[in-house]
Amino acid sequence: MTPKRIWEAEDAAAVEPILRKWLDDPDETTESVEATEPSSIANTVRVGWRARLTTPDGPRVFEQQAYVRERDGLIGWIRIVCTGKIPPD
């Protein structure tokens, strides 16, 4: 899931252009990225991060959680959920 789109990639090469378009914004500056505590449920690992940004509309923060399964030493399956960019408290 990315903003306004749910998609499936056929291979790893198909992932980069989607994420690059989603994450590249010349009007934003990433101030920090902090890892959240990972955990596992059976064969699925949850990892996460919180990012703080400066945008034309002021400071923003977002958090993402990724659920990942490994296959042959690579990511074979992943789901990422995001809060969206919101003003910090």
Image (spheres, grey):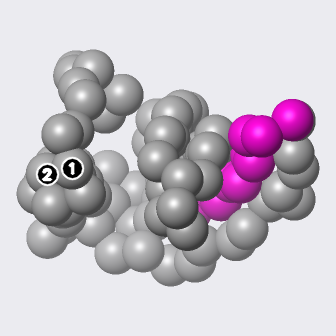
> Residue 80 location, x and y as percent?
51, 38
Residue at x 83%, y 56% (from the top left corner): 38
Q: Is residue 62 visible?
A: no
Residue with the mark numbered 1: 11
Residue annotated with mark 2: 14
Name the image quarter holding the C terminus. top right
Relative to residue 71, is residue 40 drawn left or right?
right
Q: In terms of depth relative to the viewer, which is nearer, 55 or 39?
A: 39
- Residue at the spot x=68%, y=54% of the render? 48
Query: Which of the labelled discs sits on residue 2, or is there none?
Result: none
Image location of residue 37, percent across then percent down:
87, 59
Q: Residue furthest front?
A: 72
Residue 83 visible at all: yes
Q: Residue at x 55, y 68 (%)?
A: 73
Tell me if residue 23 comes above or below residue 8 in the rendering.
below
Amino acid under disc 1: Asp
Q: Position of residue 63 (x, y in %)?
A: 61, 47
**Closest to the observer, 77 or 51:** 77
Circle 2/circle 1 CB separation < 8 Å? yes
Q: Please state the extent of the stretch shown in magenta in the rendering.
A: 42-51
